[in-house]
Image: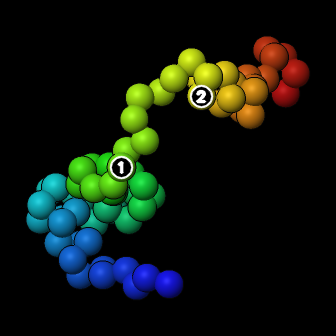
Amino acid sequence: MSRINWPKLMAAGLRGLGLTPAAFWALTPAELMLMLGVGGGGGALTRDRLDQLIAAFPDDEKGTE
């Protein structure tokens, strides 16, 4: 299990990216990593992956809520 280096992450977010504390704490770890340019990124969204996401998270039909 890896430990999170909060002081380093906070410095990167608050000083490096110029985020407010509220904006920093509202981010998910994935969003912060993306903003910092860290990680693989996963590449471009393909049609197959889009179809998988559409199947997993369908839009509700209008008026069915």
| Total numbered circles | 2
- Residue 8 drawn above or below residue 15: below
Near mark 2 (Cα within 10 A), the count class, few <14, some 14-19 or many ≥20, is few
- Would you say residue 65 is visible in this rendering? yes
Q: What colour-coding does the image apply?
A: rainbow
Rendering coords of residue 9 (x, y %):
26, 71
Query: Which amino acid type is shown beneath numbered disc 2?
Result: Arg
Q: Position of residue 56 (x, y in %)?
A: 74, 34
**Crowd class of label 1 (few under 14; some 14 to 19; many from 20; radius 10 Å):** few
Look at mark 2 in the image and give the residue it sits on: 49
Q: Say which mark, if any, is on residue 32.
A: none
CA distance separating discs 2 and 1: 17 Å
Q: Which residue appears at 43% of the width and 41% of the height?
A: 42
Q: Which of 7 and 65 is in front in this view?
A: 7
Q: What residue type is labelled 1?
A: Gly
For label 2, the SS is helix
- Between residue 18 and residue 12, name the one nearer to us: 12
Quarter of the image with the C terminus is top right
Quick check: can you spot residue 23?
no
User: Residue at 23% across / 81% down in the picture?
Assistant: 7
Q: Determine whether, in the image, residue 57 is placed left or right of residue 5.
A: right
- The residue identified by callout 1 is 40
Residue at the spot 21% in from the left edge and 77% down from the top edge: 8
Q: Where is residue 54 in the image (x, y as percent from the top left)?
A: 69, 25
Q: Is mark 1 on a helix, strand or loop?
A: loop
The residue at 40%/85% (across/down) is 3
